[in-house]
Amino acid sequence: MSWGFDLFSDFFARRDNVVQRLDSRVKLAVTLGGIGAVLFSSLPLLPVMVCFLVLSSLLGLKIPLRFLVRRFLPAAGITLMILLLHGFMIGSDPLLTFGLGGWELTLYQDGFHRGMLAGSRVLGAFSLLLMLGFVTPAHDIFRALHWFRMPKEWVEIALMTYRYIFVLLDDASDMATAQKIRLGYVGFKRSLASMGALVGSVLVRSLDQSVRTHEAMTARAYTGEMPFVPMGRLGLKAAGGIVLAFAVTALAYLASEGWGR
């Protein structure tokens, strides 16, 4: 049984390439600007283009296709669910009607189009976040967020979450391996029971870990604020890159809105 814990890795973000060497503030600003354009788009064209460009760029950076597929599976599942819910529950213009197990289901054209738009937004925004995670180490993202004056409480919570998710993943991996050795995943019923026990144990471990972490931080004179290594001044080249990226994003947004009319 593959648990997919290898997906939570900073390995690819630490590889040396052209995008990785860019200032993390530039990459964060470009990502946030792109997400804003995707979410405000009134047509699926821009989100689909963004998703395609991101996937092409990641493949060009030699990110294994199997990693991309496994990372995209949850977002694809959410997109499919959004599409089905909108298509079958919203609208008034029937597109397709069929029977399923004694039920008559109707797919509405206007609801399907709304689902396409919402689903494409999900994929476009997710692809941008995925790109950022593949080319920027997590600690650089947190430092950039701090530099952009994000609320320090949010940044600290995100930092602690990122730090201790790996501790819990290690615990979950050890417990899952022990269950597999004891044939805990032989048969559907036993697998379901083992999975429930695993989830419950990880939840208890997370609560225990929060108490231990707070005691350790208090013992080390934690005063309610975590120190961050300051970032240098934003260079002229980096600032120009941010302005250029926002200009290109705005032009792409306006062009996609105009083409779709």
Image (cartoon, grey):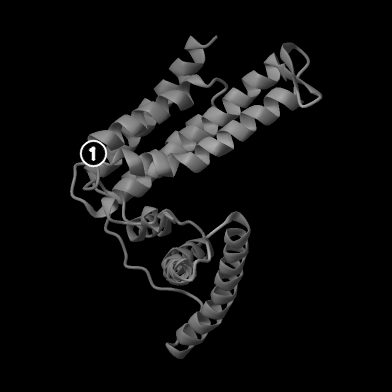
Is the C terminus in the top left, top right, bottom left or bottom right quadrant? top right
Could you tell me how many numbered marks the image carries?
1
Disc 1 on helix, strand or loop? loop
Residue 105 percent coordinates (x, y): 76, 21
Quarter of the figure with residue 245:
top left
Q: Amino acid at mark 1?
A: Leu
Residue 191 percent coordinates (x, y): 57, 60
Residue 10 in view: yes
Residue under numbered circle 1: 61
Q: Residue at x 39, y 39 (%)?
A: 69
Is residue 140 left or right of 78 when viewed as pictured? left
Between 74 and 46, the residue placed more toward the observer is 74
Residue 29 in view: no
Q: Residue at x 50, y 30 (%)?
A: 38
Between 83 and 19, the residue placed more toward the observer is 83
Q: Residue at x 42, y 37 (%)?
A: 127
Is the N terminus in the top left, top right, bottom left or bottom right quadrant? bottom left
Between 71 and 19, the residue placed more toward the observer is 71
Residue 33 percent coordinates (x, y): 44, 37
Is residue 252 left or right of 74 when viewed as pictured? left
Is residue 221 left or right of 18 when viewed as pictured? right
Quarter of the figure with residue 91:
top right
Q: Residue at x 41, y 69 (%)?
A: 170
Q: Is residue 191 above or below residue 33?
A: below
Residue 241 percent coordinates (x, y): 28, 37
Q: Is residue 157 above or below residue 225?
A: above
The crowding category of the residue bearing disc 1, from other C-alpha atoms within 10 Å (few below 14, some 14 to 19, many at least 20), is some
